[in-house]
């Protein structure tokens, strides 16, 4: 892929993402639709997807970023449904689709049909999670969707390797396939834990937010490549790079509570920017493969109608497999239940309905299909069907998922109340701890200052008021409704404070333009004002949302 073309795709996807955010649209859907139209314009250079680029450069940071923001406790609590969807459903989907394809195209070898099944089996939850977060899906549902997206790629890619081995005749039995999967899982998890532990150790010695974030950027690539290149029992066995990345991300995300505030803030900004850049890029790149898919279909040894109908059947079969699996597994023995509550009640049918319709496929499906060796029987059919499933699910399920969520009103009415109660209790504990620490400081440090007792007492009272004022502000922001928050004295005070910071910044810039303030001095002052305004704006925005 030429550098100029790559830059054009990146810039175009970012521009479409900006438009989508401006008008409250789904960025992946808009990017896919526009990219499909662009791909059909005659004379434009074709952009062929390189599987190695996606699997080694694009996929690891996306998985790592999601893992960093995932809660280990939530992940552990929903481990059973996550494994059921991320592993068991992937295997079921692969074999069902292989059976369907074998019925549609009897002359296609079973191993080739299984390759297609493995290719289309892993959903990409980027669109579903973005829509669900925007429309307020319950936290448990979001945890299941996010967790599924973190593990299903590993299961699908491992199954893909097994199917490829069957095509070339190196896979001997079903037991061999299980062995490959077991080794990939164990080695991948161990590599991820080791990578996370090493990076955490390095970070504790640095005390430098910039370098700490730089080491964090290296983690997903190092973990992925290391796991994929470890072959403990021969060339056929290797670690899962996906599981290594996910494990490292979960480990370091959990340990980030020990990092400095500057490191956490910087990491959040860095990975948010990387996500925006890569998510738009992968959807654009996926849709731009249309000309290559059509060319391959023209050279297939089948008529166009057979290919078209077969592709449509595979598309709908892929979407429909998920629906009964989600509902049936939720009412099987508790070891397989989805979204099981603490009371062991059956999960809400509305939540299951939403989960069953979040099976959009993504760029991993296209990348795996593109990576099928040229001499594989039915390669053109595999790529056509994979493209149809990926684009079709994004357009059909992506467009219908928001209305479905609104229609079913899938929200947890008690979740906000629980969150408010927990936050109030935690802030009360923090306030008491601050007062206790202030009394200790008054005895040990403030009392040693060479100031009068009355001034010392006023200083202590002032610090107490700071703690109490912050608590009252948070308490009011938590308990008030949205309209009340916007009209509250605390919100008006925050807005006024922001206006004053803006005025100060404008005055400083004017002094610099007049030649009375050096550029370096200006940058130093602006950094202080910017950080203070970011604090005010972020707090206000979080409370108003």
Image (spheres, rainbow, N blue to C red):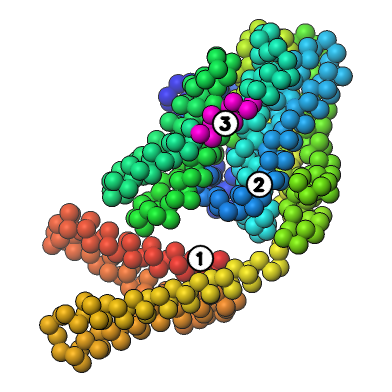
Residue 198, above or below 542: above
Determine crowd level at label 2: few under 14, some 14-19, many 20+ residues with C-alpha closer than 10 A.
many
Answer above or below: position of 224 versus 176.
below
Q: Are marks 1 and 2 in contact (CB under 8 Å)?
A: no
Q: Of marks 1 and 3, which one's residue comes earlier in the chain?
A: 3
Q: Nearer the viewer, residue 65 or 34?
A: 65
Q: Residue 129's spot in the image, x, y percent?
A: 63, 48
Q: Which residue lies under the disc numbered 1? A: 542
Q: Nearest the camera: 105 or 309? A: 105
Residue 367 higher or lower than 485, as above or below: above
Q: Work out which quarter of the rendered image holds the C terminus and state it.
A: bottom right
Q: Earlier in the sequence, mark 1 or mark 2?
A: 2
Which residues make up the magenta segment?
181-190
> Horizontally, is 212 left or right of 195 in the view?
left
Q: Which residue is mark 2?
A: 79
Residue beneath disc 3: 186
Q: Earlier in the sequence, mark 3 or mark 2?
A: 2
Instruction: Estimate the spatial distance between the alpha carbons at disc 3 and disc 2, rounded to whole Å.
Output: 17 Å
**Dot 1 alpha-carbon crowd within 10 angstroms: few under 14, some 14 to 19, many 20 or more:** few
Decide: is 518 above or below 44.
below
Real-space Cα separation, disc 1 to disc 2, in angstroms: 29 Å
């Amino acid at each position: 892929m030429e550098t100029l073309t790559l830059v054009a795709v990146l810039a175009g996807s970012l521009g479409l993402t900006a438009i989508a955010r401006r008008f409250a649209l789904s960025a992946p859907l808009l990017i896919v639709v526009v990219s499909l139209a662009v791909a059909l314009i005659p004379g434009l250079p074709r952009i062929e997807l390189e599987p190695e680029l996606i699997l080694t450069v694009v996929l690891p940071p996306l998985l790592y970023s999601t893992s960093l923001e995932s809660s280990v406790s939530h992940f552990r609590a929903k481990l059973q449904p996550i494994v059921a969807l991320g592993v068991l459903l992937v295997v079921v989907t692969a074999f069902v689709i292989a059976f369907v394809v074998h019925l549609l195209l009897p002359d296609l070898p079973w191993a080739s049909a299984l390759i297609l099944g493995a290719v289309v089996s892993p959903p990409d939850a980027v669109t579903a999670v973005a829509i669900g977060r925007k429309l307020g899906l319950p936290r448990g549902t979001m945890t299941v969707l996010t967790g599924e997206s973190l593990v299903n790629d590993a299961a699908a890619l491992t199954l893909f390797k097994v199917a490829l081995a069957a095509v070339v005749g190196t896979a001997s039995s079903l037991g061999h396939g299980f062995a490959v999967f077991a080794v990939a899982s164990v080695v991948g998890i161990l590599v991820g834990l080791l990578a996370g532990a090493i990076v955490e150790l390095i970070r504790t010695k640095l005390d430098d937010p910039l370098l700490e974030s730089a080491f964090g950027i290296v983690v997903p690539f190092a973990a992925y490549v290391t796991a994929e290149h470890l072959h403990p029992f021969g060339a056929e066995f290797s670690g899962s790079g996906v599981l290594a990345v996910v494990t490292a991300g979960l480990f370091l995300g959990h340990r980030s509570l020990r990092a400095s505030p500057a490191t956490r803030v910087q990491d959040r900004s860095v990975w948010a920017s990387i996500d925006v850049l890569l998510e738009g890029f992968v959807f654009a790149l996926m849709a731009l493969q249309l000309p290559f898919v059509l060319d391959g279909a023209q050279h297939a040894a089948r008529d166009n109608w057979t290919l078209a109908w077969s592709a449509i059947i595979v598309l709908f079969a892929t979407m429909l497999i998920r629906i009964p699996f989600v509902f049936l597994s939720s009412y099987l023995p508790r070891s397989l239940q989805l979204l099981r509550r603490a009371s062991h009640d059956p999960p809400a049918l509305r939540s299951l309905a939403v989960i069953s319709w979040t099976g959009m496929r993504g760029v991993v499906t296209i990348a795996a299909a593109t990576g099928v060796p040229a001499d594989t029987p039915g390669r053109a059919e595999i790529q056509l069907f994979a493209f149809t499933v990926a684009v079709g699910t994004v357009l059909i399920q992506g467009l219908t998922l928001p209305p479905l969520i609104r229609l079913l009103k899938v929200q947890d009415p008690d979740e906000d109340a629980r969150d408010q109660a927990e936050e109030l209790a935690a802030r009360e504990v923090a306030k008491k701890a601050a007062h206790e620490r202030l009394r200790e400081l008054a005895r040990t440090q403030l009392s040693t200052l060479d100031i009068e007792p009355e001034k010392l007492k006023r200083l202590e009272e002032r610090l107490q008021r700071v703690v109490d004022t912050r608590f009252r502000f948070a308490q009011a922001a938590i308990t008030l409704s949205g309209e009340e928050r916007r009209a509250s004295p605390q919100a008006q005070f925050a807005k006024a404070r922001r206006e004053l910071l803006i005025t100060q910044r404008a005055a400083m810039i004017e002094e610099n333009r007049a030649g009375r303030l050096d550029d370096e001095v200006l940058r130093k002052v602006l950094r202080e004002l910017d950080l203070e305004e970011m604090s005010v704006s972020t707090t206000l925005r979080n409370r108003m949302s």
